[in-house]
């Protein structure tokens, strides 16, 4: 069961959009998928039509040891969601003195076996919550926009991933780079895409997620792109990416 952390310390790069639509797309390909929202803003939770502020149990209660992952499950669009809440915003300070605080999520995931994929949606920072994701994951997907500043600040993320691999999680590996908001008609996008390929090589998925207004609209309706606009370019691209992920794993 691969546990995949989807991460980038920059916000607005399509990270949560990718978790929602990879999860929903793979579920449509008959895969059992669990998605975990580790962002205090709960964007993944809201994007799947779940009102985080109305929930009694979330990932916050799991990390505090007050609930199991299974007790928080919400079923949406063929997958299971572990929701987040604003309570998580104080996690950095609340768990600061907790022994083994880097492994709270890993311990919670230990008994979960029945899924084909588990995606961890990380917050746009490299704090304790992202560190918990990296210590729990087998793989990392990095979401990058096809824009000039895409690679700026990436060195710190790569350094954090490498230090986590060396010190806390020896099996951790970057296995996928997702290029988002891509417009192949723009020379700048083409040049940035080429730089991303030069930097990461075969880790870059062949499927680029094209800039598509439907992908931006879908979260406000609490739906994946497949529910909101199944005939859109966004749905086409994410389904293509899902198939590519499965092909890579089968190779």
Image (cartoon, helix red, strand yellow):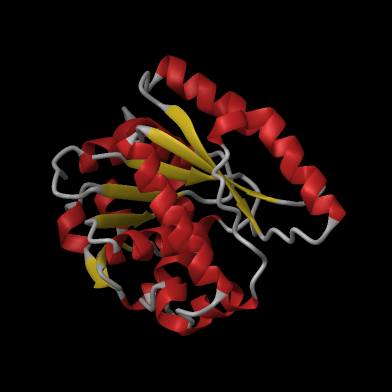
Q: Give the residue at x 64% y 77%.
A: 213
- How many numbered marks appear? 0
Image coordinates of residue 41 in percent, x first then y, are: 50, 63
Q: Give the residue at x 48% y 62%.
A: 238
Q: Quadrant of the N terminus?
A: top left
In the image as oriented, which residue stretches furthest toward the top?
166
In the image as oriented, which residue stretches furthest toward the right?
187
In the visual, does 125 lie left or right of 104?
right
Along the line of sight, the residue nearer the viewer: 104 or 168:
168
Is 99 above or below relative to 104?
above
Image coordinates of residue 69 in percent, x first then y, are: 20, 53
Is 247 above or below relative to 99?
below
Q: Give the residue at x 85% y 51%.
A: 188
Residue 242 occupies which quadrant of the picture?
A: bottom left
Q: Give the residue at x 71% y 30%.
A: 198
Q: Is residue 171 visible?
A: yes
Image coordinates of residue 229 in percent, x first then y, are: 49, 82
Q: Is residue 42 visible?
A: no
Residue 248 occupies which quadrant of the picture?
A: top left
Is 61 above or below relative to 223?
above
Q: Quadrant of the C terminus?
A: top left
Image coordinates of residue 99 in percent, x first then y, are: 31, 28
Along the line of sight, the residue nearer the viewer: 168 or 91:
168
Along the line of sight, the residue nearer the viewer: 104 or 251:
251
């Amino acid at each position: 069961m691969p546990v995949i952390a989807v991460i980038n310390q920059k916000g607005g790069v399509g990270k949560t959009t990718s978790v929602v639509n990879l999860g929903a797309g793979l579920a449509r390909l008959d895969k059992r998928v669990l998605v975990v929202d580790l962002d205090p803003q709960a964007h993944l939770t809201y994007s799947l039509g779940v009102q985080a502020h109305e929930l009694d149990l979330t990932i916050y209660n799991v990390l505090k040891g007050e609930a199991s992952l299974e007790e928080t499950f919400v079923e949406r669009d063929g997958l299971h969601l572990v929701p987040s809440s604003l309570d998580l915003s104080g996690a950095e300070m609340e768990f600061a003195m907790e022994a083994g605080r880097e492994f709270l999520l890993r311990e919670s995931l230990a008994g979960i076996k029945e899924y084909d994929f588990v995606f961890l949606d990380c917050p746009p920072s490299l704090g304790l919550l992202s560190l918990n994701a990296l210590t729990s994951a087998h793989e990392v997907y990095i979401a990058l926009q096809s824009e000039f500043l895409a690679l700026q600040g990436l060195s710190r993320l790569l350094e954090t991933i490498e230090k986590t691999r060396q010190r806390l999680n020896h099996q951790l590996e970057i296995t996928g780079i997702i290029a988002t908001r891509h417009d192949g008609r723009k020379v700048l996008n083409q040049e940035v895409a080429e730089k991303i390929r030069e930097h990461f090589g075969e880790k870059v998925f062949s499927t680029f997620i094209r800039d598509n207004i439907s992908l931006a609209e879908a979260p406000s309706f609490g739906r994946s792109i497949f529910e909101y606009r199944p005939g859109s370019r966004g749905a086409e691209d994410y389904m293509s990416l899902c198939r590519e992920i499965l092909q890579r794993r089968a190779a």
